[in-house]
Image: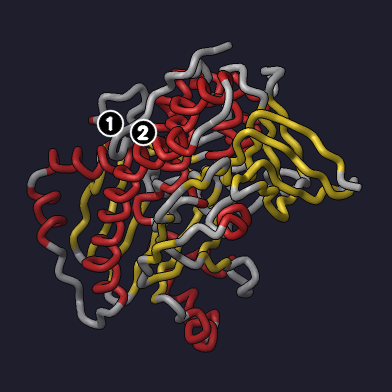
Amino acid sequence: MANTISVRGCIAGGGPAGLMLGLLLARAGVDVLVLEKHADFLRDFRGDTIHPSTLEVMHELGLLDELLKLPHQKAARMQAQFGDLGLTVADFSTLSTRCGFIAFMPQWDFLNFLAQKATRYPAFRLMMQAEVTGLVEEAGHVVGLRAQTPEGSMEVRAALVVGADGRHSVVREQAGLAIEEFGAPMDVLWFRLSRRAGDPDNPVGRFDAGRIFIMLNRGDYWQCGFVIAKGSLGEIRAQGLPLFRESVAKLAPFAADRVHELQDWEPIKLLTVQVDRLRQWARPGLLCIGDAAHAMSPVGGVGINLAIQDAVATANLLAEPLRAGPVTTEDLRRVQIRREWPTRMTQRVQLAVQNRIIRRVLGSTEPLTPPPALRLLRRFPWLGRIPARLIGIGFRPEHVRTPAA
């Protein structure tokens, strides 16, 4: 017989959205349980960026100074090389925020930090190795979920179930929520190369005919993203690893003496890019946020920060209803109304970059001509404040409004 427990809020997924929402609700005195299917957070995350908008939230919670004591690298600017044109794409030091930089921090460190701070509140519980398998419904209303743990099956009854379990969300699938797909012209191969003294400090982006290459400073190594045309991995592997290493060396000449570190294909991981959005984020008793509600393109690296913003808005809007009594469908709709516009606008910008720049670059065989927007950035560097704002803060940034119980 399944073990049954009852809470006010049950969150599926211990990622950035789930843990931040759990922390904020517990801080406001709401009894909340977060279920994470893995045994720990030590997984090969693709996005380890903490943007100024998220750092501002951490400041509002009084946690910023302690967070920044963890190992991280700061990037005040994003640099790019487009053909023969080198320029600063975004200058975060111009932002009117507490931190004028992006912090590159292993996501497992960030998640452990959030979990540690959340456990200070008696209303917070985190259960690891608890994999959500289905929803509990009564008369069309979601009243809980089922999960499998090492001790057996369990059933959680909750006034609100939140799906924060990523772009392959079980909660979203089980709820039958319709998804709008937007497509993407690319996938990304992720791997590491060692970093040495004298290497650049800021993130590096290189756009060349048929190739795009991104390098993120992770202290003693580079996190590298080799952007490829969607579905072309088989062709690239058939051409052989030596040719792949040669391509990397051409795109990052300063690291050419390190490409031999790629001895086989095993450490080169494929990130399949998808961009989508739920038409409706909620059903009675259930809400999806973060990647479960909207899978973002890697353009700008803003997915984690959109998830954090969703969590802050959800706590601001639902903490009081969860404390006071039943959560209505109208309460849940307010979350989508609040967060759908910034999500749409962000995806619109990402899709424009994908279709007008990335698709063109990947399909090119001739030397690249920089698009007009990049030529303007080179001529008028102060225009870098616009992409800095879009990437670092985004549309409609959220601020913590929930009280500390």
Report the side of 10 relative to 381 (left or right).
right
Whether 86 is drawn above or below 163: the answer is below
Q: Amino acid at mark 1?
A: Ser
Numbered circle sitting on residue 223: none
Q: Residues within 10 Å of mark 1 (few under 14, many from 20)?
A: some
> Which of 400/193 is in front?
400
> Which of 7/199 is in front?
7
Q: Amino acid at mark 2?
A: Phe
Q: Position of residue 296 (x, y in %)?
A: 41, 55
> Which of 177/360 is in front?
177
Query: Could you say whether the residue bearing mark 1 is in a helix, strand or loop?
Result: helix
Residue position marked by numbered label 1 in the rendering: 93
Residue in the picture at 61% in, 74% down: 265
Q: Position of residue 230 (x, y in %)?
A: 42, 76
Verify CB contact (< 8 Å) between mark 1 and mark 2: yes
One can see residue 107 in this view: no
Q: Residues within 10 Å of mark 2 (few under 14, many from 20)?
A: many
One can see residue 212 in this view: yes
Whether 313 is drawn above or below 42: the answer is above
Q: Quadrant of residue 342?
A: top left
Residue position marked by numbered label 2 in the rendering: 101
Q: Position of residue 300 (x, y in %)?
A: 35, 50
Whether 223 is drawn above or below 50: the answer is below
Q: Residue furthest top?
A: 405
> Which of 10/114 is in front?
10
